[in-house]
Image (spheres, rainbow, N blue to C red):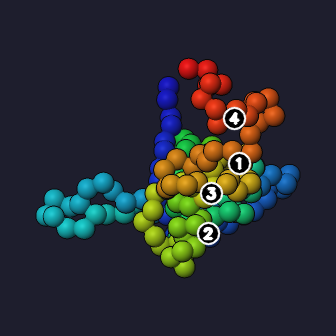
């Protein structure tokens, strides 16, 4: 069976970080995800508000680097929880358990607008999911997130500008 979901949207509030009784980190937040289409009568696009739960390192990463309005890409699985409310009624809730959370915009784009309300989908400011907590070097363009190394690797030899040394 396959249960995999990928969502891209903006956080509706700052992530809430808590710890279980054994000290395991758990973060919860809500993602506002626009639908790709408008209503049948040509109205505005609707937005779905999806609850996300992240555990352990992913939870700590999200609580440290994400805030309300920040664009996030969440990869995980859909989970349905059964629970009883105060009156004893049976209820069901759907939530996404995040395996990985990535930046959907760049911090540079967010800072230049003065907030996280821009519409950029570039990923040049930071890279990686929960395992990568270091800022990447700024990319020369808004595509990708890769930038060439600033110094040559030690196992490569520098060639002179003389065309005779080129291998082709």
Q: Are marks 1 and 3 in contact (CB under 8 Å)?
A: no
User: What residue lies at 23% left-to-right and 60% top-to-bottom?
Assistant: 38
Q: Residue at x 76, y 36 (%)?
A: 153
Q: Which numbered disc covers residue 133? A: none
Whole-percent x and y of residue 157?
Answer: 76, 30
Give the residue number, with chain letter if any, for mark 2.
Answer: 67
- The residues tagged by marks 4 and 1 sit, at their Cα atoms, a distance apart of 18 Å
| Residue receiving disc 1 | 150
Mark pair 4, 3: CA separation:
28 Å
In three-dimensional space, the C-alpha distance between marks 1 and 3, rounded to whole angstroms, equals 11 Å
For residue 98, above or below residue 165? below
Mark 3 residue crowding within 10 angstroms, few (<14) / some (14–19) / many (20+): some
Secondary structure found at label 4: loop
Q: Residues within 10 Å of mark 1 (few under 14, many from 20)?
A: few
Which residue has dot 4 on it?
160
Kindly identify the residue that appears in the image at 26 percent across and 56 percent down: 37
Please report contact status of discs 4 and 1: CB closer than 8 Å, yes or no: no
Q: Is residue 73 above or below residue 111?
A: above
Mark nearest the camera among 4 and 3 is: 4
Nearer-N-terminus badge (4/2): 2
Q: Nearer the viewer, mark 4 or mark 2?
A: 4
Residue 146 place in picture, x, y as percent: 59, 46
Q: Position of residue 162 (x, y in %)?
A: 64, 32
Q: Are marks 2 and 3 in contact (CB under 8 Å)?
A: no
Q: Secondary structure at mark 3?
A: loop
Question: Mark 3 highlights which residue?
Answer: 138
Q: Mark 4 and mark 2: span between their CA atoms?
A: 49 Å
Name above or below for residue 161 compared with residue 140: above
């Amino acid at each position: 069976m396959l249960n995999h979901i990928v969502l891209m949207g903006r956080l509706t509030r700052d992530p809430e970080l808590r710890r279980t009784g054994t000290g395991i980190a758990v973060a919860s937040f809500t993602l506002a995800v626009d639908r790709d289409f408008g209503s049948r009568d040509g109205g505005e696009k609707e937005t779905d508000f999806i609850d996300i739960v992240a555990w352990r390192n992913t939870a700590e990463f999200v609580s440290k680097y994400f805030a309300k309005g920040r664009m996030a890409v969440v990869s995980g699985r859909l989970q349905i929880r059964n629970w009883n409310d105060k009156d004893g009624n049976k209820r069901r809730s759907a939530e996404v358990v995040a395996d990985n959370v990535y930046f959907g915009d760049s911090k540079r784009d967010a800072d230049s607008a003065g907030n996280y309300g821009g519409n950029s989908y570039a990923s040049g400011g930071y890279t990686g999911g929960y395992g990568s907590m270091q800022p990447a070097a700024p990319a020369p363009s808004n595509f990708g997130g890769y930038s060439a190394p600033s110094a040559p690797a030690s196992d490569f030899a520098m060639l002179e500008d003389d065309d005779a040394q080129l291998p082709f």
